[in-house]
Image (cartoon, rainbow, N blue to C red):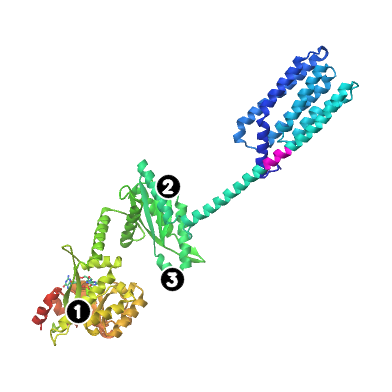
Amino acid sequence: MEHKPSSLKKASYQDIAELLYGNAKAGVFVTFVAATLLVFGFNTPEIQTEKYTWWGIMSLLMLTRATDALYWHKNENNQQDDGRRAIIRFVTGTLLTAAMWCLYCIYFSQYASIIELACMIIVVSAFAGGAATVLGAHKFTAISYALLLLAPFSIVLMLSSEQYKLILGLLGIIFSFVMVTTAKKSADFTSNAIRLKNENAELVNKMEQKVARRTEKIYQLSNLDPLTGLYNRSAFMHNLEAQLALSIENNKPIALLFVDLDGFKRINDTLGHETGDKVLKKTAARLENLRDEHHLLCRWGGDEFLIAYLGVDQDSAVSYAATVIEEISKDYYFDGNRLSVDATVGIALYPKHASKANELIQLADTAMYYQKKSQPNSVGVFNTEIGLRISRENQLKMGLAEAIEKQQFRMVYQPIVQSTSHKIIAFEALLRWDFNGENVPPDEFITIAEQYGLISDIGTWVLQQSCLAAAGWLALSKEQQPSVSVNVSVLQLHDANFINIVKSALETAQLAAEKLTIEITESIFSHDKEVILNCIKTLQVLGVQVSIDDFGTEYSSLSVIQDLAANTIKIDRSFVNMLDSGGMAIIEAVKQMAVKLDYAVIAEGVETQEQVEQLSALGIEMLQGYYFSKPLEHSHIADYMEYNS
Ligand code: C2E
Ligand code: MG
Ligand code: MG
């Protein structure tokens, strides 16, 4: 098995090879010149053929080494191996060269004249001297080269009988000793320098890796959602904006998918947040599986996910969204339990619907919202109708925020009468909004006020006005003492301060609590019952009456009605409208229940004499509707009461 060097060693090998080869071309050239001069400069007829042979071999060797040096320089920057092979090639070439010189000196010196001998000594000494530094990167070679060049030659000279050769040999031995020491020192110095350099490089490298790891961690913290590992909001926005910029350049569309889980709240509420988290994680994993390089995916928050589908048209986006829903709706299995959630997807398209990231997201969100309302667990694409609804909603929302201040609200009052005697029992207070000349119906603006958190302030104003009005009409006559019936949104009941608001409205108007009725719609049954029941009980303890409005239109729970101990139930006008086609039976049933549970019944929306007669015959105690009166302006109440006294 080949030994794998550490990164530090690998770098050292590279450096050594680089240093060695750095001087190779010059070394080869000088060697070739010296060899040629010596061989052709001195003619010794008896061994000239051997000299030529030697020169031929030496030239071949130099050619090989020169080729090797060229090859190395060419591949220097894309070295596949770690430099060790290059070193081996270089060292072999160098030692062969030294061996050739060694051979030359030992063999040819016997025939050399004193001048040729001197030249030989000068040449090999110079090479040995040069080697000490030039080959310093490789200690073994530096020393061996100097030794091979000088030592055998010097020994041969010393063995000679001639005295000057003996002296030259002795000098050569001393010189080779000096050269070996120099070569060793130089090699140690060089290898030390290489080691230090690479250790530093490795240190820097390690630091860089550490920084990179930290950067990655910071990236994760700031860009990824910790629960699902998907992009978080800011990372998604950042990427989407970049993609939009590209799309503008390339003229390519983008579809933005707003994915919202259906029924996730139920899982969280009934099975706990831990299970909820597991579902979110699994959902994220499924979305991730469906993703490729054309999708940007993020967890937008809660149970919402966004997918930007790059370069795609509406049809493909819709079919992808259908796949997303299908995938999410597959059963989940946790600890042996089977769970399922659905999803609704809203789509907005760039450039068709919007060109800014936040606008696209908002429109896709809106498309999802409307889709969920009308047909959950399906795909809805943003369209102009939704667009008009939004701009209307925005207009109304902004208008509502300053409607009280601008005195655009007023209350009207519709009488509720005793069915047989037509005596006025109460007035229902109904809010009117004159929005720059337009009479916006309360059904429309109350929903918006509820959605945008404006209902509390408006509701408070309504209560105050209604209590004041009631105190006013109660002072008009001793016999007629109608109460006031005020519509209250369930959201107001969630306000911890609501009881105080009621108390203060009663106090300011000097109105007895018994003269105030709160009308609550059936939708309370889909809210947090506990909070609402407590609030209503407190009101009843104060003496305030409670009426269930629009009864029959939504899912009703008799047990809750019983818990509420509601004083009155108002049968929705849709049943009064269809007295002849089934409405009668329902009203009859409600009346029977009312007798048992001890509450009074009001029928709303009474418009005809016939309805009055039929309802009275059924024993419905109170009636309200256009037959008796449309909602009245406050200023008309006195006349109305007098006329009906
Ligand atoms: P609601 O509480 O069921 O009010 C009765 C609605 O039926 C009133 O509509 C009234 O004008 C209408 N109405 C009465 N008699 C007849 C009739 O014989 N025929 C027909 N076709 N309609 C009749 P309005 O004033 O448009 O109010 C609509 C709804 O808006 C109310 O329904 C109530 O839920 C809500 N609302 C009105 N004012 C307020 C308020 O001050 N606060 C809150 N939270 N909701 C309010
Ligand atoms: Mg009402
Ligand atoms: Mg009603």
- The image quarter containing residue 615 is bottom left
The kind of secondary structure element at disc 3 is helix
Helix, strand or loop: magenta stretch: helix
Q: Which span is picked out in magenta? A: 187-195
Mark 3 or mark 2, which has the lower sequence index? 3
Which of 305 and 204 lies nearest the eye of the viewer? 204
**Residue at the image position 85 percent from the left and 19 percent from the top:** 110
Q: Nearer the viewer, mark 3 or mark 2?
A: 2
Look at the image and tell me whether residue 49 can be seen: yes
Mark 2 or mark 1, which has the lower sequence index? 2
Which of 151 and 211 lies nearest the eye of the viewer? 151
The kind of secondary structure element at disc 1 is helix
Q: Which residue is mark 3?
A: 270
Look at the image and tell me whether residue 229 can be seen: no
Instruction: Let me know if residue 456 is in the magenta part.
Output: no
Q: Are marks 2 and 1 in contact (CB under 8 Å)?
A: no
| Disc number for residue 468 | 1
- The image quarter containing residue 386 is bottom left
Q: Is residue 241 left or right of residue 140?
A: left
Q: Is the residue marked by circle 2 packed among few (<14), some (14-19), or many (20+) residues within 10 Å?
A: few
